[in-house]
Image (cartoon, grey):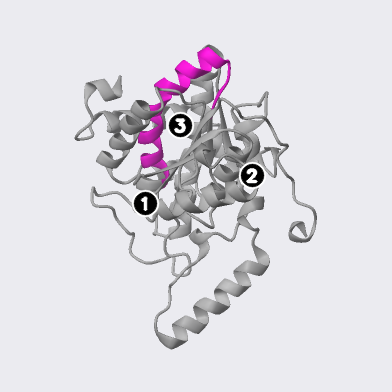
Amino acid sequence: MRLFTSKPMAEETDMSGRNVIVTGAAPNSIGYETARILASWGATVVVTSIHDVELMENSLRKDLRIIGADEKKIKARRLDLCDVKSVNDFTMWYRKNYNDRLHVLVNNAGIHKNILNPRKKPPMTKDGFEIHWRTNFLGTFHLTSLLIPLLKQNGLESGDARIVNVTSHLHDRVKNKSMFGDYGDYHSWDAYGLSKLALIHFTFEIQRRFAEKYNLQSAAVHPGSVMTNLMQTQEYEGRIGYILNRICSALASVVLLRPVFGAQTSVMCASKYPLQGGKYYVRCETAESSGDTKDRDVSKLLWDNSDAWVKTLAGSSENEHQ
């Protein structure tokens, strides 16, 4: 029913003077639309992607020119959340080029593998992690931990800094115990949901640690079920596979939201003032996340374990951690 009714839209806000990072902003993505909207409202926006960085930047700048906005508000940079060096290099580049000014971090980048064949053997990263956990959660935690000092500093100076974590309603497929070793049979949808459950815990813990002292608000966002490049699967091969892929894509386009609508809750959480932090947002308003996300002890344990992992990373110097 929601597909055929009016969609909630973020209210336009003057973002002049605000510096924003949006990860995972390839064309036809929620991140792309988030960045485009925030830049059109006056924010200086750095976008990231693993592939086709120049294409992403040119496309966003063209969109801004079309509406008469300042195309120089957009700058693109490569970032691979599974690559320690890439994360370290990106944060060092950002600090150097933007004088440590950062007001909003939108952690939008993520993957969902084996959507149509979810019981395949777990895909692993080069450093030995299940790929959804490594990309969607650990990579995001690593990047955010390096940028939090900037956000705390600018939260104190401007009175308002934000971290927006794009999660999913699929977090309710799994339980907290699965984050600490009780995995059960592998299912890619559960692995994806587990990474998003961890992001919600991360969001709530950020709020508890930094909101009152540093004016750093955090929000977890479920964007809705959106037709993006994340959903453009190529599970089947050959001529029959081509036909099946086209059919699946056509059906998905009927029942899934367009990216511009999926971006609205992220945009609202990045721009609305004041924002009620430490909450889970759906359709531009607060909603209830699963009961497991309310366990503060789990949130703290997950933070401590993840922070300990970040401190062991090869190539991460003491100065970078500080």
Task: Give 126 or 44, whichever is nearer the viewer.
Answer: 44
Q: Position of residue 318 (x, y in %)?
A: 23, 22
Q: Earlier in the sequence, mark 1 or mark 3?
A: 1
**Considering the image in quadrants, where does the C terminus appear?**
top left
Q: Inspect this view and state whether residue 130 appears.
A: yes
Q: Residues within 10 Å of mark 3 (few under 14, many from 20)?
A: many
Amino acid under disc 1: Ile
Residue that mark 1 sits on: 50
Q: Residues within 10 Å of mark 1 (few under 14, many from 20)?
A: some
- Left or right, 76 with reference to 213: left
User: Alpha-carbon distance for marks 1 and 3?
Assistant: 31 Å
Q: Quadrant of residue 312?
A: top left
Q: Inspect this view and state whether residue 304 appears.
A: no
Task: Give 105 or 206, whichever is nearer the viewer.
Answer: 105
* Residue drawn 52% across the image and 63% down it: 231
Amino acid under disc 3: Val
Q: Main secondary structure of the magenta part?
A: helix
Q: Nearer the viewer, mark 2 or mark 1?
A: 2
- Which mark is on residue 68? 2
Q: Earlier in the sequence, mark 2 or mark 3?
A: 2
Q: Position of residue 39 (x, y in %)?
A: 57, 39
Span of residues in magenta? 136-162
Question: SS of the residue at dot 3?
Answer: helix
Residue that mark 3 sits on: 298
- Going by the picture, which residue comes out furthest to the left? 314
Q: Position of residue 150 (x, y in %)?
A: 42, 22
- Left or right, 160 with reference to 153: right
